[in-house]
Image (cartoon, grey):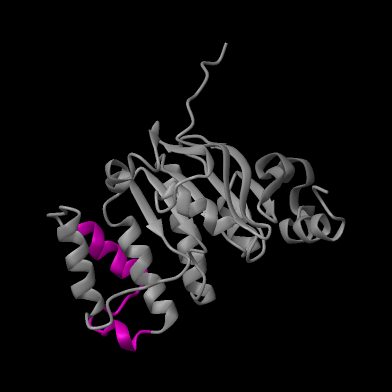
Amino acid sequence: MEKERTPVIRIDHLTKDYGFGRGAFDITLDVMKGECYGFLGPNGAGKTTTIRHLMGFSRPGSGSAQILGRDCWSQAADLKNDIGYIPGEIELPLGMTGGQFLDMMQKMRGITDPARTEMLVRKFRLDTSVRIRKMSFGMKRKVAIITAFMHDPDVLILDEPSSGLDPIMQKEFIDYVAEERARGKTIFLSSHIFHEVDAACSRAAIIKEGHIVSEIDLDALKRKEGDAFDLERYFLDFYRDGGGE
């Protein structure tokens, strides 16, 4: 008998009600070690609300969220070094260059060997001499990506991580996520870019109006349907047909 595995990420009946139908309601899901789990839904569906609870930025109204067996709200500080986080909205200190910001983050994380950061700067082709106030949205996204991965965390929480990147960099990012997954990293990826989820994730949940309305085993569907499987078509058909209602 296969030994039962303990989820790295566990969300158990998580509810946060902001009123007027806004928030996240009775969210339950598990993400296992080495899995990349996709989180799909339109703007306002509850994706970022869920991620804010995983990051310990918000206290649940009821239910809980845990990462590595620790409560995301009460033990948020203890989890920080184990998590890499890319926020959906990038806010960086405008007076710094990209290099100055990365140096500051390395010092805050206690990173003494800059080799990994330098590798990421090369991979994502970031000009670290540019001041953040002069950076495009795509350049700021690269800074956020490098910051999330620089300390080689076990868990990655990614909110619209490749938004703003050009197609070449999007592919570079997706390939890198696949490499990190192969190294055993556990990844929670919220995105509206269907190709990103399709290429990187083994499972995905569809969230609608704050509720998870479907969970998809992407690997199984690809084995069953092969090249005929189209995640975007599946998602749009699901919403068109009123899935979950």
Q: Please identify the quarter of the rendering in which residue 67 is found.
A: top left
Point out residue 182 in the picture as x, y percentages from the top left corner. 45, 43
Is any part of residue 229 visible from this angle? yes
Quadrant of image for the N terminus: top right
Residue for point 23% across, 83% down: 95
In the image: residue 50, left or right of residue 41 = left
Q: Is residue 52 above or below residue 183?
A: below
Residue furthest to the front in view is: 19
Residue furthest to the left in view is: 112
Residue 118, magenta (yes or no): yes
Residue 70, magenta (yes or no): no
Q: Is residue 222 above or below residue 232?
A: above
Residue furthest to the top in view is: 1
**Is 13 or 61 nearer to us in this picture?**
61
Q: Please identify the quarter of the rendering in which residue 115 is found.
A: bottom left
- Look at the image and give the residue range highlighted in magenta: 114-135
In the image: residue 168, left or right of residue 119 = right
**Is 179 or 236 nearer to us in this picture?**
236
**Is 32 or 16 nearer to us in this picture?**
16
Point out residue 60 in the picture as x, y percentages from the top left corner. 49, 45
Residue for point 70% across, 56% down: 209
Residue for point 29% across, 80% down: 127
In the image: residue 35, left or right of residue 149 = right
**Is 100 or 35 nearer to us in this picture?**
100
Q: Is residue 60 above or below residue 176?
A: above
